[in-house]
Image (cartoon, grey):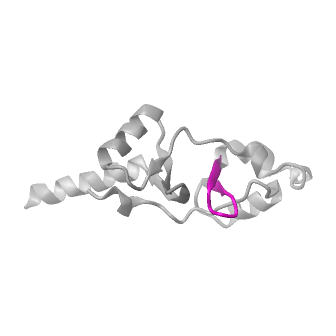
Amino acid sequence: MDWRKEIETDLSKVRSTDTLGDLVKAISNSKRNLFPVVDEYNILEGVVSLDEVRSVMFNRDLYNTIFVKDLMTIPPSYIDMKENIETVMETFRKTGAWNLPVLNNGYYVGFISKSRIYTTYRELLIQFSEE
């Protein structure tokens, strides 16, 4: 199974210098709940989770005083594009994470979801069992 085909690249990227107001705009235009924080070179700096900003996102008084860098967290790990599926799953197991960023030579590529890998794996098992 080539896990790289399961990388999700449709997440809205934000910058650490963006304001809460900028982040709320990104949230309103996205169907996702994770927002990678990258620099001008597309290097991952952190991640903002919708769950972590809910408490402040409806307070317009904070839109220009809180910045993404104040809200972002560092992911527990990342997956390198060169990793094999065994290493990817071991990283998920060790971190307990369900979503991890994928990097290629240090540059942000997207996110990989443990549930998406499991779904694809199940589909492959069904396909092979029917043959």
Residue 47 percent coordinates (x, y): 63, 49
Assign the N terminus to one quadrant of the image.
bottom left
Residue 47 belongs to magenta span: yes
In this view, which residue lies farthest toward the left?
131
Between residues 28 and 111, which one lies in front from this camera angle? 111
**Residue positioned 82% across, 56% down in the render:** 19
**Residue positioned 45% across, 48% down in the render:** 79
**Residue positioned 51% across, 64% down in the render:** 9
In the picture, measured across the screen, residue 77 lies left or right of residue 13, that is left
Residue 68 percent coordinates (x, y): 76, 51
Residue 83 percent coordinates (x, y): 36, 50
In the picture, measured across the screen, residue 88 lies left or right of residue 63, that is left
In this view, which residue lies farthest toward the right?
61
- Per the picture, the main secondary structure of the magenta-coloured stretch is strand
Q: Quadrant of residue 5?
A: bottom left
Between residues 113 and 77, which one lies in front from this camera angle? 77
Q: Which residues lie in the magenta part?
A: 36-48
In the picture, measured across the screen, residue 44 lies left or right of residue 92, that is right
**Residue positioned 75% across, 58% down in the render:** 23
Residue 84 percent coordinates (x, y): 32, 49
Compared to residue 95, the image places residue 12 above or below, namely: below
In this view, which residue lies farthest toward the front?
105
Residue 118 belongs to magenta span: no
Between residues 97 and 17, which one lies in front from this camera angle? 17
Q: Quadrant of residue 22?
A: bottom right
Assign the C terminus to one quadrant of the image.
bottom left
